[in-house]
Image (cartoon, rainbow, N blue to C red):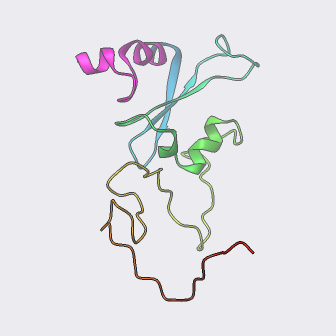
């Protein structure tokens, strides 16, 4: 309970949750567990459109929002993906959040975080020398 009151980076703080629950309606949830809401009216809007929110499951990281929900949050699509899902093409890969700084981040060969051993030079490199 204290975590919900004092931390904004683990989902939404208690005040934000209360405000969203009072002023909005639940629209849907994505595969990551993030929950999406839309305001019931345009009372809080800046430009006449209903406000939209996401409450992240776990750490609040914007790259955890899949493309279809991102489009709905930014008013690219009027209908949420629960009503009108985006068509998937066979060449499209699944959405991955930004993994930088996590144990799943990509580490090239020679990286200190991987092995620390750089591969040996192949001899095709010649250092530049000023003339």
The structure residue drawn at horizontal position 65% and vertical position 75%, both measured from the top left corner, is 128
Query: Looking at the image, which is closer to me, 11 or 22?
Result: 11
55 w.r.t. 44: above or below = below
Q: Which residue lies furthest to the bottom in this view?
A: 123
Q: In this view, does 68 lie to the left or right of 76?
A: left
Along the viewing direction, whichever of 74 and 99 lies nearer the viewer: 99
Principal SS element in the magenta part?
Answer: helix
Given the current orientation, which residue lies at the most extreme left position? Answer: 1
| Quadrant housing the N terminus | top left
Vertical relation: 102 (above or below) 119? above
The stretch of residues the image draws in magenta is: 1-21
* Side of 106 relative to 67 (left or right): left
> Looking at the image, which is closer to me, 109 or 24?
109
Give the residue displayed 31% in from the left and 54% down from the top: 103
Residue drawn at x 34%, y 21% is 7
Q: How many marks?
A: 0
- Identify the image quadrant of residue 52: top right
Q: Does residue 15 show up magenta in the picture?
A: yes
Image coords of residue 94 (percent x, y) = 50, 62
**Residue nearer the viewer, 124 or 97:** 124
């Amino acid at each position: 309970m204290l975590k919900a009151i004092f931390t904004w980076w683990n989902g939404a703080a208690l005040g934000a949750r209360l405000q969203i629950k009072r002023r909005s309606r639940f629209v849907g949830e994505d595969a990551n567990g993030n929950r999406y809401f839309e305001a019931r009216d345009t009372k809080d809007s800046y430009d006449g459109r209903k406000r939209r929110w996401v409450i992240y499951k776990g750490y609040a990281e914007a790259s955890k929002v899949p493309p279809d929900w991102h489009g709905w949050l930014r008013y690219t699509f009027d209908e949420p993906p629960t009503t009108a899902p985006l068509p998937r093409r066979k060449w499209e890969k699944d959405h991955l959040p930004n993994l930088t700084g996590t144990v799943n981040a990509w580490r090239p060969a020679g990286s200190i975080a991987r092995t620390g051993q750089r591969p040996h030079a192949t001899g095709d490199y010649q250092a530049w020398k000023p003339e």
